Amino acid sequence: MKNRSPLVAMVALAATMQACAPAEQADDSADSADEVSASVPGVVEVVARGLEFEMPDTVAPGWTTFRFVNESPMVHFAIVERLPDGVGLEEQQAQVAPPFQTGMDRIMEGDMDAAMAAFGELPPWFGELHFVGGPGLTSPGVTSQATINLEPGTYLLECYVKTNEVFHSFNPDPAMVGMVVEFTVAGEPTEVAEPEADHELVISSESGYVLTGTPMAGANTFRVSFADQATYANFVGHDVHVVRLDSGTSIDDLSAWMNWSTPGGLNTPAPAVFVGGLNDMGAEDVGYFTVTLDPGTYALVSEIPDPGAQGMLVTFEVPEAM
């Protein structure tokens, strides 16, 4: 498995860096997510360091804002998945992560039949996962946030971006866990009100993105309505991510990169700077995301094959502040 050792090395490096941090700093970082979540009702701070997430293990039901701080040197997202009854992190790591990684390995070898056979090993309960959003692609040093309405249950927070064609949520070492954490939604509801939005974005498989409002410099909150949902050739549904387009950014490269099921797709480093978004949700679901924008050119883009052909790669300009 020649393409797996770099991931192991990165995990080890991240662990070493954390172990070498001053004791006071280490204690602060370990407690930061719980402190923020406890101090602000309805806010859960998620911190990415290396190939690990830090967040509380219990979250209250209701409207919940996941504030995603990417302190890792790699781009990540934090998709939220509600699990069927009786399933947890252990089953995900044993029954879902390996077939996806084996399938990706076979794709890299050019054997699509073997890849599809590997994906065919996914457990029946995988089809019962309910994807409920979460912060979109967020580049190193960037903070983004997404707000969703959580019901009681068992959930996972996952990043399946790849490095050296190895999914971050897969770990070849059975003694370790990939970039995925389990948390429980339980207790008294937060009673936090549904957010107010600056812009409306409707996503559908027929019309693509329909955006109302002009994003401006500074913080922008988008209300995202999923008019419908579809499962695309790469096993995911449509979503939305915000990416800054610099003079050297290739739209073709960006479009190709969004498809994890191709060599180089969703593989670090990213071809541009991502500032957040909202991961996929079910038909008729509603979620919110907030991103901070500087003046310049941006795109809304979905993690599906050929998003432009589906109307899900749309550029827009953020003007200079008046």
Image (cartoon, helix red, strand yellow):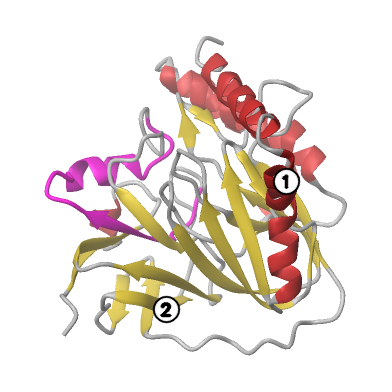
Q: Is residue 191 above or below residue 202?
A: below
Q: Quadrant of the N terminus?
A: top right
Instruction: Answer with the quarter of the image where residue 214 lies.
Output: bottom left
Residue drawn at (76%, 50%), measured in percent from left and top?
A: 182
Question: In terms of sequence position, does the residue under pointer 2 or pointer 1 come before the other?
Answer: 1
Residue type pointed to by label 2: Thr
Labels 2 and 1 touching (C-beta < 8 A): no
Q: Which residues are magenta?
A: 236-262
Q: Of discs 2 and 1, which sits in the foreground? A: 1
Q: Is residue 284 above or below residue 300?
A: below
Q: Is residue 82 visible?
A: no
Residue type pointed to by label 1: Glu
Q: Is residue 218 visible?
A: yes
For residue 275, side relative to residue 66 (left or right) = left
Q: Quadrant of the C terminus?
A: bottom left
Instruction: Answer with the quarter of the image where residue 258 lies.
Output: top left
**Label 1 Cα neighbours within 10 Å, binned few <14 / some 14-19 / many ≥20:** few
Give yes or no for residue 249 being in the magenta stretch. Answer: yes
For residue 88, side relative to residue 19 (left or right) = right
> Which residue is disc 2 drawn over?
221
Residue drawn at (51%, 46%), measured in percent from left and top?
A: 235
Counting every numbered tag in the picture gives: 2
> Which residue is disc 1 drawn over?
24
**Label 2 Cα neighbours within 10 Å, binned few <14 / some 14-19 / many ≥20:** many
Identify which residue, 149 or 233, lies in the foreground.
Answer: 149
